[in-house]
Image (cartoon, helix red, strand yellow):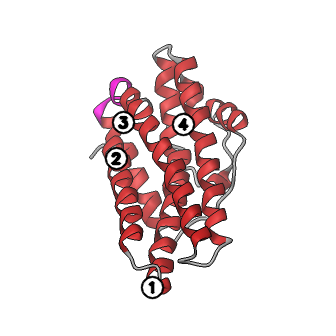
Amino acid sequence: MDITQLVLDDHHEQRRLFAILEQIDRRDTGALSAVWGRLAAFLEVHAAAEEAIFYPALLQVGIAARRRSGVEDETLDAIHDHNDIRDAVTEVARHSAGSDDWYAAVAGANLANSDHMAEEEREGLTDFRRLAGLQQRHDLAVAFATFEARNVTGVVPVDKDPAAYVSQAEAGTLPASDGSLRIGDLRRA
């Protein structure tokens, strides 16, 4: 098991759920609401798991490999993207399922999420596979899967200041409320 594969698997599921929404009759608001509710919760749990487990570890391995600026930039961008996705999900909730405005908001959420996933797959996941050993990737995968299983019904969405997040992650002082499992310690890097 590898955390990078679990993240990719989640990305596939997110794409699948967005595609399902496109195939449901707009008059079937019950189905649209149910699928969107699942997707909205999944997007936030995935982001929270990445913020608690993946990005602190990416920073750790990047610093150890003397690639601090690269992984810091990737992490800053990812946290900013997560905030954009949260904002887009909030926008969807302002509209009635099946309405033109609802579909436009869902499309906005899909675009924000798709842009994030593409960057993460090209940069963060690639860097992590290059810099982290198999045992660490396995251990983080277990933590990631556990986090998502414990929070399958959702977590409270909280925007984060990207710069403060990186500073706290590098210092090993992310607030406990972020759901962190305290995997690794950046102070050793």
**Structural distance between the alpha carbons of marks 4 and 1:** 41 Å
Earlier residue among tags 3 and 4:
4
In terms of secondary structure, where does tag 3 sit? helix
Residue 137: image location, x then y, percent: 34, 38
In terms of secondary structure, where does tag 2 sit? helix
Residue 104: image location, x then y, percent: 57, 62
Q: Nearer the viewer, residue 178 or 24?
A: 24
- For label 1, the crowd category at 10 Å Cα-Cα, with few meaning under 14, some 14 to 19 and many 20 or more, is few
Q: Nearer the viewer, mark 2 or mark 4?
A: 2
Q: Nearer the viewer, mark 2 or mark 3?
A: 2
Earlier residue among tags 2 and 3:
2
Q: Quadrant of residue 135?
A: top left
What residue does disc 3 label?
Answer: 136
Q: Is residue 38 above or below residue 81?
A: below
Q: Is residue 132 magenta?
A: yes
What residue does disc 1 label?
Answer: 28
Residue 29: image location, x then y, percent: 50, 84
Q: Which residues are magenta?
A: 129-134
Q: Is residue 4 above or below residue 12?
A: above
Could you tell whether 20 is left or right of 90 in the image? left
Q: List the single residue furthest toward the top.
A: 66
Residue at 53% in and 20% down: 70
**Structural distance between the alpha carbons of marks 2 and 4:** 18 Å
What residue does disc 2 label?
Answer: 8
What residue does disc 4 label?
Answer: 56
Residue 46 seen in the figure: yes
Residue at 36% in and 44% down: 3
Q: List the single residue furthest toward the front.
A: 100
Magenta segment's dominant SS is: helix
Give the amino acid at mark 3: Gln
Earlier residue among tags 1 and 3:
1
Residue at 56% in and 33% down: 75
